[in-house]
Amino acid sequence: MSGSHGRIARVGFRMADAFAYASGLAAAVGAALTLVASRIFDAPDEGRWIFLVAAGTFMIYNLDRLRDLERDRKTSPSRTAFVLRYRKWLYAGLVIVGSGFAAVLRSTPPRMIVLCLLIGVVGLFHRRIKERPALKATYVSVAWAGACVGLPWLASHFHPLGPWVAGVFLPSLAANLIASNLRDNEVMTIMPGEGGPNKRLWAARGFLLVAISCAAFGPAPMRALVWIPLTEGLVLMRFWPTERYGHLAVDGGLLIGALAAALHLARFA
């Protein structure tokens, strides 16, 4: 019986790894965060923004992983092996998802198109500037917030809760990226000096406290968003700088928190 359970667990981990390595997890995080922001703003056409963020995330992340195999081989060897093994399927996925993205974008209002293009430019140059981890944590979290918050916020015609939602999303995403850099074993400059990794982990937890404060002490609708930094904080309470923990737990914490926030909004809003 124990052998059967072990095989089931191994299959489950392989499926979860494939979902993360193919950028499905990142796309799901983007979709869930955009859903939450859309519900807070009562944004029209929320399915459009969810699709654009999920599809855009899938394309940007897979393009980066397909273009930067040598560097990723050092920081994420298991993911790189997956990308090399299934690169044809990933390219096919890029064509299919990219076609859908272009079709939806064509009927999108101009200001949202401009925002998508700006974020896309950041994604295309990510390979060149991600060697500076402090800068990486900043611009990637801003780009994520720009997509997940910016699109539904523009669609809602500048809902007054926009800055509050950004105040939860930005530090939560920054904490996630700091932890991801620790998992990648990159040399960071956010908190230099002795004991760097431990200090940087505490910096990530500090960002999450900022996000929790924005959710807890902001306007009433913000209470639901506390799940996002809370679940990420639980993941970072005990941190293992392994590839699997970084891909599944650190990113999964954001996904679970966003889904919990969406359920909270659906139940109590």
Image (tube, rainbow, N blue to C red):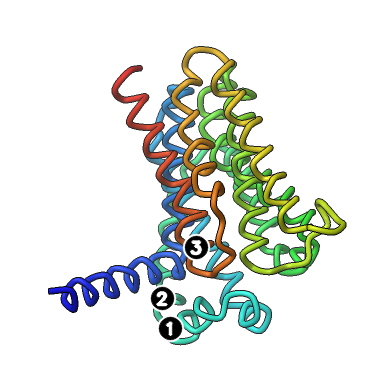
Sequence order check, earlier mark of 1 and 3: 1
Q: Nearer the viewer, residue 117 or 90?
A: 90
Q: Residue at x 70, y 63 (%)?
A: 126
Residue assigned mark 3: 245
Q: Amino acid at mark 2?
A: Ala
Can residue 102 be seen in this snapshot? no
- Marks 2 and 1 close (CB-CB < 8 Å): yes
Residue assigned mark 2: 92
Q: Residues within 10 Å of mark 2 (few under 14, many from 20)?
A: few
Q: In screen coordinates, is 85 left or right of 169?
A: left
Question: Percent position (x, y) of residue 153?
Answer: 55, 28
Question: Percent position (x, y) of residue 201?
Answer: 68, 50
User: Which quarter of the rendered picture does the N terminus lie within?
Assistant: bottom left
Q: Nearer the viewer, mark 1 or mark 3?
A: 3
For residue 64, above or below residue 197: below
Calculate the distance from the C-alpha at mark 1 to the C-alpha at mark 3. Answer: 26 Å
- Marks 1 and 3 close (CB-CB < 8 Å): no
Q: Residue at x 22, y 77 (%)?
A: 7
Identify the secondary structure beneath mark 2: helix
Identify the secondary structure beneath mark 3: helix
Q: Residue at x 55, y 23 (%)?
A: 215
Q: Residue at x 73, y 63 (%)?
A: 125
Occupied quadrant, residue 213: top right
Calculate the distance from the C-alpha at mark 2 to the C-alpha at mark 3. Answer: 28 Å
Calculate the distance from the C-alpha at mark 2 to the C-alpha at mark 1. Answer: 6 Å
Residue assigned mark 1: 88
Q: In screen coordinates, is 263 left or right of 240?
A: left
Q: Amino acid at mark 3?
A: Tyr
